[in-house]
Amino acid sequence: MRFLYRVGDDELFARATNRRDFVRVSDDVVWAHESHEWLIAAGTGAVLAHRTGDVYYSADTGRPLYYETSEPLPANADGNGGSSRSGRHRIPAAESMRRRHERHR
């Protein structure tokens, strides 16, 4: 299983039980599909983000939006959301992430 957490607040946003379909945890609706490291909106086909490593960067701004884990973070062991600040995922400084994103475009 794959879990997507929002970078800003470490909240569980979506999960994927298969290789490419992410379901929002708030409403259990398919939100996006991953194709060749790109997140594509399920409803519109809009490009949402690009993955480098375990971080998804905005397709528009290059800013980090989500990070992926293969296991739920400790405060989210049930996979149903909730804060995980005690097990906070370390994200590099925003400037270095933008440079890293630009190299992979």
Image (cartoon, rainbow, N blue to C red):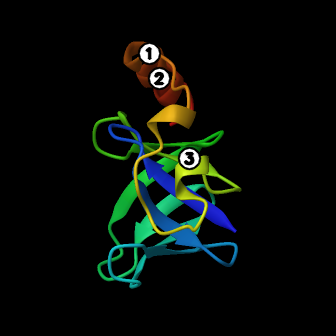
**Amino acid type of the residue tagged 1 in the rendering:** Ala
* Mark toward the viewer: 1 or 3: 1
CB atoms of marks 2 and 3 within 8 Å: no
Can I make out residue 30 in this image?
A: yes
Q: Earlier in the sequence, mark 1 or mark 3?
A: 3
Question: Could one spot residue 88 in this view of the protein?
Answer: no
Locate residue 75 relative to residue 25 in the image: left or right.
right
Residue, x 46% and y 66% (percent of image)?
Answer: 14
Name which quarter of the figure residue 55 lies in. Answer: top right
Q: Quadrant of residue 94?
A: top left
Return the residue at label 1.
93
CB atoms at circles 1 and 2 under 8 Å apart? Answer: yes
Residue 20, image x, y percentages: 62, 73
Q: Amino acid at mark 2?
A: Met
Query: Looking at the image, which is closer to me, 82 or 5?
Result: 82
Identify the residue under disc 2: 97
| Residue 88, image x, y percentages | 52, 33
Using the image, determine if residue 30 lies above or below residue 76: below
Q: Could you tell me which secondary element the residue under label 2 belongs to?
A: helix
Q: Is residue 17 left or right of residue 23?
A: right
The secondary structure type at the circle numbered 1 is: loop
Specify few, some or many for label 2: CA neighbours under 10 Å numbering under 14, 14-19, or 20 or more: some
Circle 3 sits on which residue? 51
SS label for mark 3: strand
Q: Nearer the viewer, residue 79 or 54?
A: 79
Q: Separation of disc 2 and disc 3 at Cα?
A: 12 Å
- Amino acid type at mark 3: Arg
At which x and y percent is residue 95?
A: 39, 14
- Which residue is at the front of the view, 9 or 38? 9
Marked residue nearer the N-terminal end (2 or 3): 3
Name the residue: 33% across, 74% down: 26
